[in-house]
Amino acid sequence: MTMLDDRQTAAPWPAAYPQGYAVVDVETTGLARDDRIVSAAVYRLDARGEVEDHWYTLVNPERDPGPVWIHGLTSDVLEGAPLFPEVAGELSERLAGRVLVAHNAAFDWSMIAREYARAAVTAPVEQRLCTIALSKELRLPLPNHKLESLAAHFGVVQQRAHHALDDARVLAEAFRPSLLAAARDGVRLPLLECRPLTEWYDSPVAPRAGYRPSPAQSWRPSRKRPACPYPNPGRYESDKPLMQGMRVAFSGDTSVDRELLEDRAVEAGLHVATSVSRLTSLLVTNDPDSATSKTVKAKSFGTPVLEESAFTHLLRDVAPAATVAVPKPSPSSE
């Protein structure tokens, strides 16, 4: 492990780096699009990663708190907590004008963006930075991408794992040496755009007082999509439109919420694939140089790769399929 201070970084400080950061952690009722935030914490950092202040709040999710065995927040604890619209103003003050930093930032941003959408307020966030992506850019020798591994690498001691305030503190203390190392080595920060969420899904959840599922049970509902009605026309070709039936896979963090992006692809007539094979028409990723299983397979198969912005532009005008596949009747149908 190498500890860095400002004297060890290259001078001058990179002009392209942001002027301030908001290190964020949220605990939630689950992982799905209709889950809610139960607590949130923000550490505000200056341009060089020094802590300016911190803030923490409980949030009443107006539903069952979900995995209490993880975050420790029961219905009784959350009953008197403020609703998200009541804390949105304070949270906005701490996010405004800063890059949102989180460990697995796509998740934290999507949960925050949905809460703002429900409150009919726009989140004042333009960019985010995922510390998992940054650790990959720095090529840190981590055994995995867990927060505890990043903390251990920089000698940061966790006190209360899965408590939003302590997780945000740990991440803030680990982010500063990461930022200094990036500045010293001239590393590009993996910044992604945060677009205000205007589409979101929310289903009513009946209160389940006293309900506690077993730790082995998943609280994220599975999403089964209908079969794509169009045959696969083959691989995407540069400078040509997408065509209905093309098999599209996604990898890595996306600016638009991943499930919304997949929904838009399905609505346009594309087949969303969960893996990359020789039949995949296109891989969408903002980090084509990463060593994820999907990008590695795409390179080995020669699968075309597009960035998210180019893909969303092409989604506006998807070419119709030449034919429609007729589904075979099931044995029980008459």
Image (tube, rainbow, N blue to C red):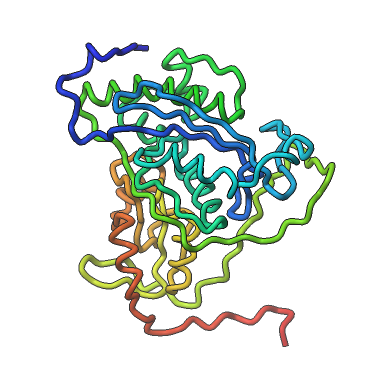
Q: Quadrant of the N terminus?
A: top left
Q: Quadrant of residue 307?
A: bottom left
168 or 239: nearer the viewer? 168
Residue 120 versus residue 218 in the image, above or below: below
Residue 225, image x, y percentages = 57, 66
Q: Is residue 63 left or right of residue 181?
A: right
Q: Nearer the viewer, residue 61 or 242?
A: 61
Q: Horizontally, is 103 left or right of 318 in the view?
A: right
Write down the quadrant of residue 323 in the picture. bottom left
Residue 199, percent from left and from top: 50, 63
Residue 91: x, y in percent? 50, 40
Specify whether 145 is left or right of 233. Answer: right
Quarter of the picture holding the C terminus: bottom right
Indicate whether 316 appears above or below 127: below
At 73% from the left edge and 39% from the top edge, which residue is drawn? 80
Q: What is the count of numbered marks? A: 0
Q: Please give the name of the residue rendered at 81% of the width and 49% of the height, measured from the top-left corner.
A: 208
Pick out the residue farthest to the bottom: 334
Give residue 60's quadrant in the image. Answer: top right
The residue lying at 36 percent from left, 38 percent from top is: 98
Which residue, as the protein is rendered here, is positioned at the far left? 12
Whole-percent x and y of residue 258? 46, 54
